Image (spheres, grey):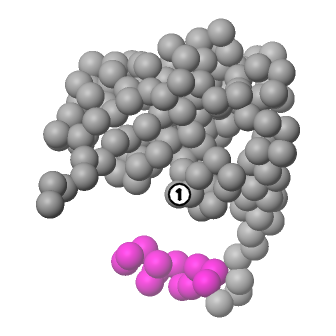
């Protein structure tokens, strides 16, 4: 029996009105750190191989375990809200950005002998858009409400300095 070749897919996502929503990344487990770096808020350029990726203030990565779009996906969402002082993602480059990510991964040989492809853009229906937005917003709400339990607060500073 021939072993099935794993394909790493980048799926450009659009809202029902055809405005760019972001990208879904299928089989990108080994590239999660790269995807997170693409969404940096530190105004730092990200490099992968020879490709340079400018920082954008309104991209955010999210792990989506299960949705109508698929399972175990990384989603980079283009957020609407930005400050005028920050540099938001230029939505007219929606597909070009997906292609650039694929090129960088292929040239960097992150996955030898495996495919990286950019799928045709998906125009999500309202229920899929709503579902993803709800998942992403609940994740944001959860992470912003984390409090540190007294049991894991730093201890003696001299001892803490040893670790």
Give the number of marks.
1
Task: State which quarter of the image contains the N terminus.
Answer: bottom left
In the rendered structure, does residue 162 fall within the stretch colored magenta? yes
x and y, in percent, of residue 145 in the image: 80, 65
Q: Which residues are magenta?
A: 152-163
x and y, in percent, of residue 57 in the image: 67, 28
Between 149 and 59, the residue placed more toward the observer is 59
x and y, in percent, of residue 151 in the image: 65, 90
x and y, in percent, of residue 143 in the image: 72, 61
Q: What residue is at 54 percent from the left and 33 percent from the top?
A: 11
| Element type where label 1 sits in the image | strand
* Quadrant in which residue 39 is drawn: top right
* Quadrant in which residue 114 is drawn: top left
Q: What residue is at 83 percent from the left and 45 percent from the top?
A: 127
State left or right for residue 125 relative to residue 61. right
Residue named by callout 1: 72
State left or right for residue 128 relative to residue 45. right
In the rendered structure, does residue 132 fall within the stretch colored magenta? no
Q: What residue is at 77 percent from the left and 64 percent from the top?
A: 142
């Amino acid at each position: 029996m021939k072993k099935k070749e794993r394909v790493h897919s980048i799926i450009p996502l659009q809202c029902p009105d055809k405005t760019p929503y972001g990208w879904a990344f299928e089989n990108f487990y080994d590239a999660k750190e790269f995807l997170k770096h693409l969404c940096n808020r530190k105004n730092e350029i990200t490099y992968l191989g020879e490709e340079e990726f400018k920082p954008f203030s309104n991209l955010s990565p999210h792990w989506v375990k299960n949705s109508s779009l698929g399972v175990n996906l990384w989603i980079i969402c283009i957020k609407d809200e930005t400050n005028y002082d920050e540099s938001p993602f230029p939505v007219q480059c929606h597909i070009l950005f997906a292609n650039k990510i694929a090129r960088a991964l292929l040239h960097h040989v992150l996955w030898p002998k495996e495919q990286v492809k950019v799928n045709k853009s998906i125009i999500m229906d309202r229920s899929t858009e709503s579902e993803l937005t709800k998942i992403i917003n609940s994740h944001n709400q959860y992470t912003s409400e984390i409090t540190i339990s007294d049991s894991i607060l730093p201890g003696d500073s001299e001892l803490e300095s040893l670790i």
